[in-house]
Image: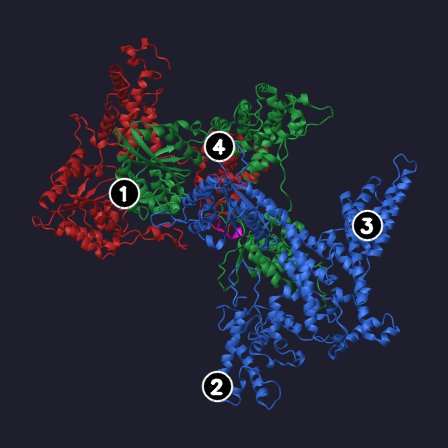
Amino acid sequence: MPTSPSKRSRNLINLVSGSLPLQFHECLNSQKYAILHALRNMSDIQLENDIEDEDDMDRTNTSTSQNLDELLCGTVERGEGNSCLLLGPRGTGKTMMLERALSKISSGDSPPVIIRLSGWLQQNDRLAMREIARQLREQTGASFLSAEVEEETHDRDDEPNPFIDNPADDPETSVAEPSPTHLPALIAVLPTLSRASIVILEGFDLFALHARQALLYCLLDTAQSCRAGANSKGLAVVGLTTRVDTINLLEKRVKSRFSGRILRVAPQTINYWRRLTKAILCVFVGEDAFTDEEDLAQWRTTWETRVQQFLDDKSTLQTLSETFSITKDMRMLTAVLTSTVVTLSPEAPWPTSSQFLTSAEIHRVRPLYPYLHNLPYSAICLLIASVHAGTAGYSVVTFDMLHEYFRDQVRSSTAAPVQINGGSIGMTFETLVAAKIFVSVTAPSWNTAKEFTKYICVVEREDVKKAVDKGGMIPLKKWLNKAQ
Amino acid sequence: MASNPLLYHHHRLREVSFLLHASPSPFIFINDPISPRMTTQAVLGALSSTTSTTISMHLVHVNAVTCFSARLLFDAILNGLAQWTPSWEEGCTNWSGPNDTRRYNESLDAFLRGLKTLYSFLHHSDSNLPRVTRFVIVIERVERLKDRLPDLIVPLTRLAEMTRIDVTIIFVSSGRWDDMRPSLGASPDPYFVDISIPTKEACVAHLCSVFQSCQTEPNLSLNPYHPALEGIHASFASILCDACFPFTNDPDELAYAAAARWPGFVQPILDNHAMERGKDDSNLTERDDNEHLFTDDAMLVDDTHDFVTPPEEVRMRLNRYFKPSITAALEQLYPRFSNAQDWADANKPSPEALEIVFPVHRVDHLSKPRIGVTVKEKPAEPYRNLTRMSKFILISSFLASMNPAKSDLRMFGRGLDEKKRKRRRITKAPSAKIKSGPIKIPQHFLGPAVFPLDRMLAILGALLEENDNDDNFRPSKIDFSIPGEYTDMEVSRVGVCSTIIDLTSSRLLHRTSPVERLDGPPMFKCGVSYDVVLGLAKELDVPLQDLLWDSL
Amino acid sequence: MSPIPNFEDISQSVFLIPYSSLDDGPEEENETDLREARDVLENDLEHGDILRWEAYQSAWAKCLDKLQTIIQKLHEPVVEAIAEEIKNAYTETFPGLPYPELPTITISNPAGGTSFLNELTNQLDRSNDEADPSSFVTHLHPAECSNIMAGMKMLITGFIDRPPDKAKTQFKRKPATSLANYDINLLNAWFAAVRNDREQRNAKVPSLVAVLHDFEQFNPSVMQDIIDICSLHIPQLPLVFVMALSSAQSPSYLHVTYPRSTLAVLRIRQFHVPFGLHALEEMLRQTFFTTTFDPDVMLGPAALGFIVDYYSRYNSSLDSLLNMFQLVYLKHFMINPLSPLVKTTPAADILSAVASYSFVDTLFGRLCTTKTSDAWREKPLPTLIIAVDEAREVFNACIRKSRLGFELMIVVNTSLASLGYKSVEPDAHHSTALLRIAIDLVKGRATKHIEMLSSLIRKLKFSEVSSFLDTLRTYYRDAPAHIRDQEGKHKEHIDHFIAGLPQEGDDQYSEKMRQLAIDIGDWLLNYLDELVQPLEELPLWEVWSTGQTPFPMELMNPSIRASTVSGLLRSHEFSDSAKKPEETNLWDLPDTGILFQRYLDSGKMINVYDWFDSFQSVLETQRRETSGPRKGSPRKRGKKSVGGGNEGKWKLQVQARFIRALHELDYLGFVKHTGRKADHVIRTVFDVCDT
């Protein structure tokens, strides 16, 4: 788009009703980059604390993190054995907080050995042990498990068990694992290391599901029993979980070993969100080779005013608070903001509340099938047929049934604009099945012909109706309305 | 083959690629209900096309169908990211770290370790300026992960936080995330990208892009994919989309149909052009298989300089002439009853097409314009190979599958008095009001039911007695005193049993009870459709309709 | 052959349980027949069995050889077409497709038998020169592809087992740290090596052909994935799938069973192996009804009729067809004492042997009736030999004539059919004109067809006459030499007719034409009548024709239940044939037989106690009869041990035998246990015709 030099005057700030002049494209781009970058690492964003904001949540979290820091440094410096549980709903920044604490500790003079386990990865104690041993080896250089256990290159590959189709337990992915008998010995090593050690258990509740909770028992027991001041080094066991009842999952003997220290991490407040949003959106664009100062200055001022407008917009606030009331998960905010920012383009350079709303809708509570009305005619026909089957009182549908309904319709009303032979309808049916609009209720069997497998239609009558109305084909409407 | 994909649903993908070049969210889910294949191609194209100075992006694309075991998935991802192609000479070893020869495909932990090693390796290897090294893993058809590798879903979605490296994983699926999301919120919600269903314009654009992608050299002689024909092709694409949209809007399918119809569609134009240039008939006939012509560079005669795009009314005539054949093509091609090439060969336009489209060429002998192009019919009498007995067996197995067992006596029972068989009077489908709860679905909707072998044999006996007794090869009736005894003998012959086994092995009958089970009769199920059985019954003049308990 | 066949294998339709003298069971018919083949017929030659066996072997060898060549000829075109298709599966390109399609060839081969696939594989190998084969072939069987991992493994290892290049070097893979052997990328790597090698020596890059045997048996869910995976790697892997289907449906099994998503990645080309009545026709026509080939033994009406019927009714596989022909031959030489005469007449010394007196006597009986001259009285044997040779000549000449007649009829018939006349009315069972005419011919009832043909010809339209004559003439022109010079005069007839064709302009054109047509009709009538002679009148005809001897149906297609029942009812006829059925009484039967008899007497439900009692009473009589001083074969199952033994043991034994017999019946499936009524079982077999 042409930009005459005349336009490049001070008052161009408030021209921007339409699209962005050329020389600002770079600014916009880098602004977007900056924002997205900020969204990724929120932890290092400084919020300007405005005075009137007095939220206790914030305070709990700060206290939590203080406790955590003390606990860890107690372990590292005074060689205590500690155990605690970081408890809080998803996306409240448990991990973030822990990482911050760890980095603080590790930057200290005696960096501890950090062992990270995750309930989703180490699904049983043996895997966990292998992982512990490996991480120990990586950080201390010494090997702690008998050799034949860590020797991992077996040639199991040439006989894939023909009887097992589920690769989860096919031989060559499952590895020779240490026998559980090694477990206490391995854990007992930890306090004897030259440095204090911190064991982090993500998804703590999942570890509680392991057999006899052996790992937890050993860890907590060692932690509890390692004496401060003795020549042994400290051990801290930090669990992260979202389940409030995690403590009750623990067996008695395990629970008795656990210090019972539960550090709660509270979700942020709506105010915090608002401030965060503002902070992120107004993140400072770094100097850039492509743009000259003046443009950049103009850009910043304009951008900030725009963002301010955007934030002051009632509907923006409403969307924000709605989202907040649905989930206090910080990642939700991230996603929404991301999709808002990403869509900005030279044609529509400024964040708008409507855009904000749509991206919120995409990510918040997702509509089942937003594209229903765009489906081809034959697909819609199938949906209507399934509605008819439903009104006839059939719990499940087979393709044959739907096809018959369709044929009857075609026969009865000459109004059906397109005649479709079974073949292609059937094929459309398959796409619907692939899109999980029709869900098979029976396990697929080799012995039932395609057209007779039982399905249920997950699309409600209402949605079909909407789709038909949007599609606006009169005969289809008529047909649908016949189903009462 | 993947024609420039950005023409189609491009703005969403621009966002994605921008996101990936900025700082992406670690887990992105792309949902495309119609053609996930295209979308994947598009994403890959978009990512590989744009290059960034600050980010060195390492891209890998794996297909969840190909990687049916965890090991394959791990190998594919690692090798792909490292751009390592195993070579036969080196014994097809996987990428195994910069120095050590560790094994990374044995378990999830090992894989993550491998991923980290690879990351640091690559990060140091391209360390000219402080660049961000970023892994992008695109997994196609993820819905298959759910039933194949369910316990991998959570780790994959949490890949970034577990490895603590800059990696983004992109799921592309025709299904929805909600259908495969693990329980207990074990994996974080993705950043959703919904691909909308392609509009007609998008499809037309796509077709044109396909045309361009397989265009031939302009200096080649005129051929269906000659650049000069682009205009005509555009109009062709639009009428094709008009014709096909009620059935499908899958760009791939449209392209398929187009590929099959286009050569025939332009044929008159080409012939006309040839004639204009005073080509003799020999050349004309040689053009009949024009779609192969452009591949040989033998005739590099530049005869296109004088080619003029035909006027509007010619196009109108073309469209009118070929429109019916387009839906016909789809009917054949969409279910793949025939493939594009064979269909195109079978449906070359008849010479009179030329005369219709260009009345100039109409020869004096009156040729009444027949409509359209006729779709070649498939050879009839499909089940000709069946022996007479197996036809009877199929019919009786269908009856056994469709009729309730208790009805057999009424349908087939023969007392001394030849009482008429009474069918159940047809009842209307009961309305939901009266009963509560789900209603029994009529059998013909549920398909064939399972029956014991004995029952089918009994029905077979009845059928044979009724419809097969005119046999002149029957031994003289003397040694068979009791009526029906002969057929009784027949149905217990080895021939019948082996026929049943043959039918089972060719899946016209389905055996539902395990072969190794000895007690009780083996259970079977009819494997052919009503229409087929109807055809067979006509052939053997068996009154099928009277023998069915529920009339279909 | 294997001692115990694998009965669970559902791909087998029939199991052969070879007879060993140890086991005896109900299904013994085949075995008995075989045995009586060994023993000498009445009025047989000396060593007649050996002579007949040799005669049979030569005759059948000749016939079988012919049949197999015919089969090959039937298959040849299809095989070549497929090989061609495979060759340029990847060379011809079709522009504009959204993605490359996986070339797939479905072969529907209902006639069954692996012969076709073998021919195909041979063809593929033949087309390859040893150095660089133009295609690598691997075979997949359903059993090996129970799941996708096994399937992919079979597919891939099937290819990579052969070294990729001339330097026949196989590289050792360290399985753990290299690609899994079910990973398609392994195949990729291997083929890359192949490609390099070929391109260095600029030879053609081969295609990878996977032949899937009994495709219907493959688990579709597994195959879908395999196909998907493969389709993602073409064309860099030039894979071609060849699917052997055992049924010819349309839409094909693929379309019926597999989802569209799978079909969409395939480029399916369908091929059909000739089968059904057409195949039968060809084999019959070219073997038994042609002027170019003389089988030693002609099929009689009974055999032919049965073969046609069985083929069209039960089993249309070529293998079973061959079996039937062989059986006909076997039986012919088995029961017919005169059959050694088929090709040669035994020398005088054999005939003069004492053992072959009756044989010679019958010959005299057959031949002397015709003419009694002095020659017979002076030196009978040589005359006899001469007479036999004469008879052979006569028969051959005659049957040649009638074969020629048959060919002519077929030619006329087809030409008429092409003109749109329906000369032979079809019937439900074997609806082809050729078969009808053939059967009636061997029955000696061909005249009705002949008359119909001639009458049709008499009524021919004028326009059609000349074309008809042309077909006749061409037939004669192409006929083998001996026919041509032997039937010269008829050829002249035709030429004369053609010469006699009146001109359009001719004033009494129509009369002449009509007259001509009538002449042709009459000529054909007489000619065919003279050609087609009923064979039964000829001397010793049954030597060269199986005549009315029925086909040994029980061998092809026994009725299981019937034979089981008869085995139980009349077990003696199987065990010792000396005994006449009427003089066996109930207690003579083995226990199971006795129990079964009682079973037949009882009602729908059997009270086991009553059953036992009745059984016991029979055994009592049996005991009395056998223990008494009575000649006759001692009964089996060690009953002498009980002779006068104490009662307790006897009771026990009776019980034991009862239970044993009961269990046998149970195994045979004659009783059904339902808990419905205490100690009762249900009959499963009723109204057994026991006569």
Q: Which residue is mark 3?
A: C453
Q: Amino acid at mark 3?
A: Leu
Secondary structure beneath dot 1 equals loop
- Chain hosting mark 4: B
Q: Amino acid at mark 1?
A: Asn
- Chain hosting mark 2: C
Vertical side of C545 occupied by B20: above or below: above
Single out the residue that lies furthest toward the right: C507
Q: Which chain wears blue? A: C
Q: Is residue C396 left or right of residue C671?
A: right
Magenta stretch, main secondary structure class: helix
Single out the residue that lies furthest toward the top: A6
Task: Look at the image and tell me in which quarter the N terminus of chain A lies.
Answer: top left
The picture's colour for chain B is green
Q: Is residue C522 left or right of residue C421?
A: right
Crowd band around label 2 with a 10 angstrom C-alpha radius: few (<14), some (14–19), many (20+): few
Q: Which residue is mark 2?
A: C649
Secondary structure beneath dot 4 equals helix
Q: Nearer the viewer, mark 4 or mark 3?
A: 3
Secondary structure beneath dot 2 equals helix
Marks 4 and 1, how far apart at CA: 47 Å
Q: Which residue is mark 4?
A: B251
